[in-house]
Image (cartoon, rainbow, N blue to C red):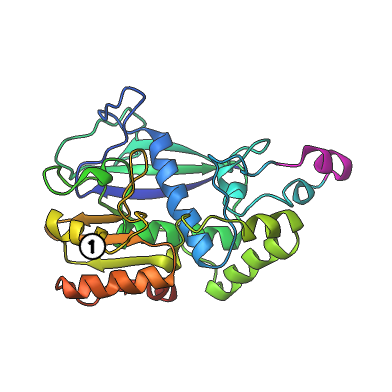
Amino acid sequence: MENILQIQLKTLTPLWTGDIDRRSNEIQETAIVGSIRWWYESLVRGLGGFACDPTSNDSCIFDEEAYSQTNSLEAGLKDVCPVCRVFGCTGYSSKFRLLITDSQGNAKQTRLSRRGGEQFQLQFVFVRPLRAEELWLWQKTLTLIDKWGSIGGQTTKKPPKMPDFGLVKISSLPELPAGLDRNAVEAYLNQIITQSENIRNRLTQTPKEYPRLDHFFFKSGYWINQQQINDLLKIDPTGFLAGRRGISKKVFSFRERGAARIWGYTTDDAMLTVVLKKLNDLGVRGTKTGKEVLHGL
């Protein structure tokens, strides 16, 4: 039986979900799902779990042979990371499909304005049920996007001259089962690791460049200009923060009134410490680390 998770979403700024022709006149479901998955992966890694990169040569593959021999879905999923168990991988379809409707729930092609302020619904139709731990991760991922992050494209192209993109307000978050907490979710993520030698091996080889929430930094109610961002990027001799052609920078600033924020991520605790010190030198006080945000979820 299908279960529908309905989310109310209001754009605070324009939302960029460009199509194959790099236009963003209408919301592209794949772009929304891709953004949610990115934050879901970062959360899982920040909690100590393993999340593959679905675009890499080492992405997850459902074990069809193990499944056919045992008639057990868990056998086929043994070497599949907790993110792919929800969003799908080779041989295993996503647990859900996304429908985008207007604020009254009427299905239509939702066109995007250039100003934001639009309201619509995201209806996640689950064809297979979520585990309680997956529902927790789902809800907290949406909370991260709402309170601290952003979704969609073009966030990497600003500031200074580009407008803010990707800030949204999310409401109607799903309720969580009583007694389910972060410790239970961490235990679930660890169980997936301990039961699979394949995942344990891939975990040890995870590139440090992969985003993980405990290496993030966040500041709400504040923004920094282009010169300040450039000063921040210069502290990293590896070039990771600045990115390069085809690879985004890792520091994002939004000046939208009532929703200003800074967020970004580093490769490790040492780089995070240097970033926090530089932000303080730039007058940005009280920046939260990803670990602090995790403990507040």
* Near-viewer residue (152 or 176): 152
Residue 115 in the figure: left or right of residue 173: left
Residue 181 at least partly seen? no
Of all residues, the one furthest to the right in this rendering is 69
Residue for badge 1? 232
- Please identify the dominant SS of the magenta region: helix
Q: Is residue 109 visible?
A: yes
Q: Is residue 21 above or below residue 56?
A: above
Instruction: Give the magenta part as a residue range.
Output: 62-71
Q: Is residue 252 above or below residue 215?
A: above
What residue is at 22 percent from the left and 45 percent from the top?
165
* Circle 1 SS class: helix
User: What amino acid type should be assigned to the residue bearing mark 1?
Assistant: Leu
Instruction: Answer left or right for 74 relative to 291.
Output: right
> How would you rate the neighbour count of disc 1 (Cα within 10 Å): few for under 14, some for 14-19, many for 20 or more?
many
Identify the residue at horizontal 25%, vertical 28% (top origin).
Answer: 25
Left-right relation of 67 to 243:
right
